[in-house]
Every structure is written in C-alpha cells, then in structure tokens.
Image: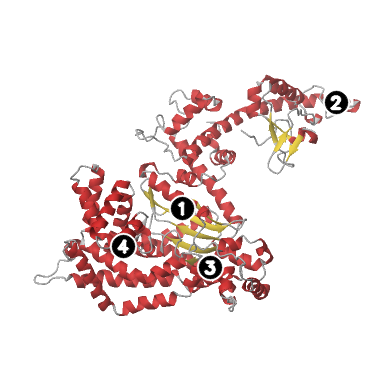
C-alpha cells in the first residue's frame, strides 16, 4: 500500500515539499543496497518482501538523474540507489554519505553530539517500532475496501441467499472473498484472522457497515467535487426506492464538464421518511449541509414520482423554487412527458393503468414466446388491416408503455392484450410456467376492470393534446426551441376541453363503454367506491356521472396545472436560448436571437456588458454561412466548437442551459440512469444497499482506496488497532 510518509528518519518531504514515494526493490541484492544506504538499523532485520510491501523512500533521497518523470507517472531507473540523506538526523553511528565523504568538522560535530543523539536514537526506536503496526492496519483496511469495491462493482450481494444470521458474516460472500485473498497470500488479512480465533472473522457486521458508510461518503465526495468544479448543475430525482424497509429518494446531478460535455451522475440516496415541512427542510439540509452542494448554483430541477408520494415531492420542489428561483422546474428527459404527467395523478383509475403498464412491460420482456403470443393475438383482431397489424407488432417489440403515445397504443391493442393473457392463463397446451400463468391472471383482472378501460380512454384523449409538444420539448435542439414557442397553443386546447368537459366526457364515456362491451366488460362504478359511499335506498350512482367527477375533470385539471408549473416563464426563456445553436440561427436568418432570453443568465456570464455585441457577432457568424457549409445542429456539437471559446458569454449561457433536465443527453452521457435502473431491476429488495448501489452505478469512476482507508481511520480512530 502506498504510504503517506518516507521511511527515512526525520524526512519532511510530506510536509514542506511533496515528493513521489518509491517502494523498496523486490530484488534481494538491490534491496540490500537500499538498506545499507538508508540510516535505519531496524530495516536490516526485515525481509525484502516486507520492505517491498510496507516501506517507501521519497524522491528527495535520489539523484535527479535517477528519476524519470512524465505527465502520467514518475518512476525510478532500474539501477537507482538512494544516496542523499541528512547526516545530522541519522540515528545510527555508521559512516554514511550525502553524495560525498564527511569532513573532519562533521566528524567532530558528531562526537560532540554523541550523547544527545544516543538519547534521540532510543526515543526514535520506539516510534519506528510502531510504524509497521500502523502500516499493517492500513493494509488490512485496504484489503477490506478492495473486496467491498469488487462486490459493489459486480453487484454481488454481501450475504448469500442462505445467510440468515443478522450478526454473522461467516458464510457470506464478503467473508468468502476475504478467505480467498488470505489463501492467495494476503498477510494482513491472515494476521487479523489468526488473531481472532473465537469468531474466525476478519470483519464484524458492525465494522462492515462502517466500511460501507465510509466508502459511500468517499465516492460521493469525489463526484460532488467534480460537480462543484464546474459550478452550475441541475438536481434530478427518481421514483422512491425501498431499502431495508425505509424509503429513499435517488438523486442525480446534471452538469457540463471541463470538456464541455453534458454529464449526469448518480450521487446517492436521501432518506424520505417523515412528512410536511420537516421532511422538506431535512432534504434541503442534507443537500447543503451534509453533501455541501451550493444550491445557489442550481439551474434546474426535475422529479419523477408516482402518485402516492407526489404531494411530498411537489412540496420539496416548491420549496426549492421559492429559495432558489433560478432552479426552474422541468420534466426529465429520461421520462416521457405524458408518462410523467400520468404518474403524478393520485387517482385510483390512473394508478391502476400505470401499475398495469409496468406489469405488462415486465411480463412480455421475459421471453420471445410471450411476445410472439401477443403478436398472434394482434393478427386475430386486425385480419383485414395487415399494415396496421404490422405497425402495432413493431411497436410492441419496444418499451411501448413509456412512449409518448403509450395510451393510444394501449387502446389499439387492448382486446389483443386481453386475449393473449387469458390464453396464457388457460395454458391449454401446457406451454407456460406457473409464474407465467399467475402473472397473466393478474394482468387479465386489471384489463377486465371497467375503471381501467375508462381511465385509459380519458388519458388517451387528454394527453393526445400534449403528445407532440412533449416529444418536441424532449427532443433535439431545433424541436425543443420550437416547442417553447408552441406552448400557448397546447394550453389553449386543454382549456377548451376543460371549459366543455361535459361534452368531451360524454364522448369519452361512450368510447370506453363500446371498447368494454367488445371485451364483455360491464360498465360500472368501482366496487371500492360503492363500499365507502353507500348511497341511500332507492338511489344509484350512475357510472357516467361518477367518472366525470372522479376521473375526467381531475385528469384535465391536473394536466393543465402541471404544464403551467413545468413550463414557467423562466423555463421557456431557457429553452428559447437554444436559438444560440447554429442550425437554429441559420433557419432564422432574418431574426436575431432575443437578448431578453439570454439576459436571464446575466449573473452567470463573465461580462454582461459585452453581451449585446457578442450576441450580434455570434448571430452574424452563423446566419451568413454559405450554402452547403455544415453547421452544428445540437447543443453538444455547439459546445464542442473549437472557436466557441472566443465567445465567452455565449459559451457560458450554452453551458448553463446544457444542465437543464428537459434536454435529452447524448447516449454516452446517459449511462448513470440506465445503470441505476438496471441495478434496481437486478437486485432483490433484501440485497439492496445505498453504498453498494452508488458503487455499482459509478463503477467506472476513480475509487481511491487509500483515501477510503484514511477516511475510515479518521472517522473511527477507536478501531484503528482493533
């Protein structure tokens, strides 16, 4: 393990002049020469293997001609021998040199100070003897962290499926890997294992939890340091995750790095236990006080949350917007706008649709046979419309339940879907497993519920008005810029539906009744509602009236409210700043970008005074390109322009809007979210861990094991020599 100090006595290279550290050579002859030169008698008792493993000399003790340096690494020449040592600080009486023989004055001075130095030698000898013990402890801790990181990166649970004891790691995956390392020659682990003959464990459960905690903090610290280095960022959260029986909020940060590339990193979980103002304040305190984020630099926020926790997330988002007005609320590019709008509705029918969509997605992704069964059912219901049938089959081979047009697709294939799952459940030819037939029955029950059919039809018709807008605003730069200018038309259409909801609901109810009748589903009020609201004898609640009051009106109202909140004036101004992308400028040669929109970021740019002139020069540069000249068409391409650095204000604005969660990322920049979803899908609830999730999602990040060891010893000093 690379130590943080030099083995030469009284060497100050780690304090006043940081020097590279070099291991003692493994070659016995060369190692012996190093020991002879180094003024420490105790080193002569060590084997070359021990010296190589535990001791270092810094570059201060070698002639500069013996050290090869380059930007990536600093190494010694193969025949390098240390020759430079401070004679006055040597605790031995040997006649060592500092590149030349000692003078007579040096010898006289040595004799005069002989008694003092003898006392110093005895004191230092005690200190020297403690160094190997500290190093062994560090080596032991590093071995533990190495195993922990390996398990996290490979998503291997700490405990195996047969591990039932909460306080024992004896049969765990973690312990098994430790034992493997010991058998492979890890002396530090073996020594600790042999010293604990009762429990026969290298690491207790309590210490393991401490290791995970330190590992998590170190990794997050490295990620947050990268974000802080680039100043501006956006806060992005995902749906709540249950770990060890408690709810946690996954947090991502989106920023633009030093190479002007958009990045999104998963930085960990926030505890989401509690309610009201106390929960909101605690979440903010965690972000600012514990994690050290400067929320004054937050330029956007996006939250993906289901209906059950929606109100809490809304309160958190509202508080953020109140305290930090520049942190505009936006949709998230990884979740289609229509799906996001529907997920936030705390209506039983809508939640039934969304939960059934997840079951359908999971069910048909299991095997190609199930997918083929669905395609066969589609062919049955579209015998005379081959083109339409092929189109639906193609769509169903994708993750269609999260598309912008998911509700339209669901209505088109609903009869086929019900036929398919009923066939799987019947299992007449015994082709399907018990799990398949059970899950098919669960989906069938949901599809055959009139509340599901009615909610699906209402969502389809309402969200058809936001479908094109959502696809554009979360699309390419040109499309997002166009969407910012088309919001008024979308809101106008939604308002027209709201104002005439009686008429629209009548059409929607008729459509749902006809679709349900084709599947032999009776139109009725949900049983759960009837049980809670028993009507007076002789009166009955009509389905049409019930669904208007409890479904159609709330859905339309929710969509209008959410669209207004997600696309406030500041968010629209930010999207209109996409007019700085050259391809948009070229398309609008006659119209110079509006300075008012760019002025939104006047406090974020290097020189607001030169903004008007620079904006004009930027417009002239791109609006007068010759025919056939290629121009950047995306925000990413624009940020990568070599000459964008000559327009510092433009670069600053482009970097800030590059953090907006609305805008889609390049495929390579979206890896963190995909890894996070994969971790949740592949990890059963009982094996999930906050720390290991952070490790797994960020497995490509630099993990400094030495920093983890130092952090652990600082946090838990009482365990240093346990």
Q: Give the CA distance from mark 1 to mark 3.
A: 24 Å
In-image side of 187 versus 269 (left or right): right
> In the rendered image, which quarter is residue 717 located in?
top right
**Along the viewing direction, whichever of 631 and 364 lies nearer the viewer:** 631
Is residue 356 depicted above or below 434 in this figure? Answer: below
Is residue 647 among what the camera can see? yes
Residue behind mark 2: 112
SS label for mark 3: loop
In-image side of 108 versus 378 (left or right): right
Which residue appears farthest toward the right when viewing the image?
Answer: 104
Q: Which mark is residue 673?
A: 1
Q: Give the CA distance from mark 2 to mark 1.
A: 70 Å
Q: Earlier in the sequence, mark 2 or mark 4?
A: 2
Q: Residues within 10 Å of mark 4 (few under 14, many from 20)?
A: some
Percent from the top left, x then y, of residue 492? 39, 78
Q: Earlier in the sequence, mark 4 or mark 1?
A: 4
Q: Are marks 2 and 1 in contact (CB under 8 Å)?
A: no
Which residue is depicted at the point 73% across and 30% down? 9
Percent from the top left, x then y, of residue 522? 16, 64
Q: Which mark is residue 326?
A: 3
Q: Are marks 1 and 3 in contact (CB under 8 Å)?
A: no
Q: Earlier in the sequence, mark 1 or mark 3?
A: 3
Residue behind mark 4: 388
User: Number of callouts in the render?
Assistant: 4
**Along the viewing direction, whichever of 54 and 395 lies nearer the viewer:** 395
Q: Give the CA distance from mark 3 to mark 4.
A: 46 Å
SS label for mark 4: helix
Q: How is the image coloured?
A: secondary structure
Mark 2 or mark 4: which is in front? 4
Mark 2 or mark 1: which is in front? 1
Mark 3 or mark 4: which is in front? 4
Which residue is depicted at the point 70% across and 28% down? 124
């Amino acid at each position: 393990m690379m130590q943080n100090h030099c083995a030469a006595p009284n060497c100050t290279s780690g304090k006043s002049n940081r020097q590279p550290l070099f291991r003692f050579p493994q070659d016995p002859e060369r190692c012996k020469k190093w020991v002879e030169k180094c003024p420490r008698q105790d080193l002569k008792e060590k084997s070359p293997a021990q010296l190589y493993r535990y001791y270092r000399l810094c570059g201060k003790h070698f002639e500069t001609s013996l050290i090869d340096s380059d930007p990536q690494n600093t190494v010694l020449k193969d025949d390098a021998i240390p020759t430079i040592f401070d004679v006055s600080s040597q605790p031995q009486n040997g006649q060592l040199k500092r590149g030349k023989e000692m003078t007579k004055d040096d010898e006289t001075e040595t004799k005069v100070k002989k008694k003092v130095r003898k006392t110093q030698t005895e004191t230092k000898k005690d200190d020297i003897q403690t160094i190997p013990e500290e190093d062994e402890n560090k080596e032991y801790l590093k071995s533990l962290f190495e195993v922990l990181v390996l398990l996290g990166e490979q998503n291997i649970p700490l405990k195996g499926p047969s591990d039932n004891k909460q306080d024992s790691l004896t049969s765990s995956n973690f312990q098994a890997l430790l034992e493997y390392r010991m058998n492979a020659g890890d002396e530090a682990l073996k020594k600790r294992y042999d010293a604990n003959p009762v429990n026969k464990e290298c690491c207790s459960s309590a210490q393991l939890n401490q290791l995970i905690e330190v590992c998590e903090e170190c990794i997050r610290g490295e990620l947050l340091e990268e974000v802080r280095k680039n100043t501006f960022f956006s806060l992005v959260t995902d749906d709540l995750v249950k770990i060890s029986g408690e709810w946690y909020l996954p947090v991502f940060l989106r920023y633009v790095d030093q190479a002007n590339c958009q990045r999104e990193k998963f930085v960990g979980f926030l505890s989401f236990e509690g309610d009201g103002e106390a929960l909101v304040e605690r979440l903010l305190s965690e972000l600012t006080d514990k994690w050290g984020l400067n929320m004054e630099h937050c330029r956007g926020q996006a939250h993906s949350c289901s209906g059950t926790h929606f109100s809490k997330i809304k309160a958190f988002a509202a508080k953020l917007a109140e305290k930090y007005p520049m942190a505009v609320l936006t949709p998230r590019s990884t979740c289609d706008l229509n799906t996001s709008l529907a997920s936030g509705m705390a209506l039983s029918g809508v939640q039934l649709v969304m939960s059934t969509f997840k079951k359908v997605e999971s069910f048909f992704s299991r095997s190609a046979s199930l997918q083929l069964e669905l395609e066969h059912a589609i062919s049955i219901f579209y015998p005379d419309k081959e083109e339409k049938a092929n189109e639906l089959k193609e769509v169903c081979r994708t993750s269609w339940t999260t598309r912008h047009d998911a509700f339209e697709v669901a209505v088109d294939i609903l009869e086929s879907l019900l036929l398919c799952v009923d066939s799987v459940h019947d299992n007449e030819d015994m082709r399907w497993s018990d799990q398949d037939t059970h899950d098919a029955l669960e989906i069938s029950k949901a599809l055959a519920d009139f509340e599901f059919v009615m909610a699906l039809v209402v969502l389809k018709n309402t969200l058809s008005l936001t479908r094109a807008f959502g696809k554009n605003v979360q699309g390419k730069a040109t499309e997002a810029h166009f969407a910012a200018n088309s919001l008024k038309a979308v809101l106008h259409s939604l308002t027209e539906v709201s104002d005439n909801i009686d008429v629209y609901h009548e059409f929607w109810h008729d459509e749902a009744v006809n679709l349900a009748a084709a599947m032999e589903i009776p139109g009725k009020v949900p049983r759960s509602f009837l049980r809670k609201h028993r009507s007076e004898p002789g009166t009955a609640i009509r389905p049409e009236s019930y669904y208007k009051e409890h479904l159609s009106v709330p859905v339309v109202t929710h969509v209008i409210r959410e669209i207004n909140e997600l696309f406030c004036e500041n968010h629209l101004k930010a999207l209109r700043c996409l007019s700085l992308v050259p391809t948009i400028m070229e398309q609008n040669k006659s119209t110079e970008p509006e300075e008012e929109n760019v002025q939104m970021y006047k406090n974020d740019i290097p020189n607001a005074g030169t903004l008007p002139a620079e904006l004009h020069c930027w417009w002239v540069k791109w609006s007068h390109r010759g025919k056939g000249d290629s121009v950047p068409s995306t925000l990413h391409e624009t940020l990568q322009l070599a000459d964008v650095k000559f327009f510092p204000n433009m670069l600053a604005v482009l970097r800030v809007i590059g953090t907006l969660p609305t805008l889609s990322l390049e495929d390579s920049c979206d890896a963190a979210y995909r890894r996070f979803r994969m971790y949740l899908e592949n990890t059963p609830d009982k094996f999930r861990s906050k720390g290991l999730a952070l490790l797994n999602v960020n497995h490509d990040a630099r993990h400094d094991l030495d920093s983890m060891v130092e952090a652990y010893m600082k946090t838990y000093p009482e365990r240093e020599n346990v």
